[in-house]
Image (cartoon, grey):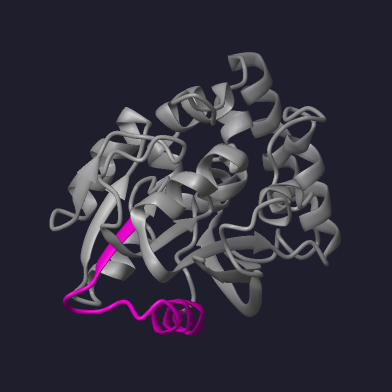
Amino acid sequence: MSDGRIHDAAARGYQSAVEHYERGRPSYPDDAVTFLVNELAIGPGRTVVELGAGTGKFTDLLVFTGAEITAVEPVPAMREALTRNCPTAHVLDGTAEAIPIGDGIADAVVAAQAFHWFDGARTLPEIHRVLREGMRLGLIWNIRDEASDWAERLTSIFDRLAGPDAPRYRDGRWREAFESTDLFGPLHHWVAYHVHQVSREAFVDRVMSVSYVAAAPPAERERVLAEVTELLDSDPELRRSEELVMPYRTDVFICERR
């Protein structure tokens, strides 16, 4: 995202993939959510800003803390789902690079499955602006475990659509903004593990929720769908059951505003 605009793959892909995203993406494990909530002191009487809130998968978990939640999301279809899923949150149209709230309002800022899409050099000064002094930023990602042969093959099926310069969490480029700023203290990392049990249909939804797949031309999407179906039918581990287990690692990062 840059200059108030978002990456084309995110804009087009997430606009058309809302239903796939809601059905196919996992929630976040309780221990990871509890860790982040405790570290950021999120609770009643606190104001939390979530950036790139999507359909509200993480927002919904924050609502139960009793904090006042402002959720910022630039994609209209995602924002519509977010409003429906989290009716008590204050939902705003906006980007991480131009957060549509005033200075020093937030007691915490969070981003779930999103920061790698942001222009970090523009986003961190904005987060610094809206956070109160000494308050914290929390980042969280669910990452598919690729230890199995089928998981690695699954990634290869849709990764070819992304291109070499596509924003990815795994390549770590999102960290560069933190390494070149004195606005925030060091990133502290914490890890949790969980599994997502899905039907074959939800397994396909998980793939179709990938922004680059959703944004691809119809012929490319059909090719991906055919290859995923073939994987489900041929892999010895996957073809044995109608309920599939997708393992995940959840990475949580915390840093403090200076």
Residue 229 position in % (x across, y down): 67, 41
Which one is nearer the viewer's eye here, 242 or 228? 228
Which one is nearer the viewer's eye here, 164 or 71? 71
218 relative to 24 in the view: left or right: right
Residue 258 position in % (x across, y down): 51, 66
In the image, is residue 154 part of the stretch drawn in magenta? no
- The quadrant in which residue 193 appears is bottom right
Does residue 17 lie above or below 253 as drawn? above
Residue 204 position in % (x across, y down): 57, 45
Does residue 247 lie above or below 4 as drawn? below
Which one is nearer the viewer's eye here, 179 or 158? 179
Q: What residue is rendered at 30% in x and 57% in y?
A: 104
Does residue 83 lie above or below 217 as drawn? below
Q: What residue is rendered at 63% in x and 23% in y?
A: 222
Q: What residue is rendered at 73% in x and 49% in y?
A: 176
- The quadrant in which residue 242 appears is bottom right
Which one is nearer the viewer's eye here, 212 or 105? 105
Q: What stretch is highlighted in magenta?
A: 30-49
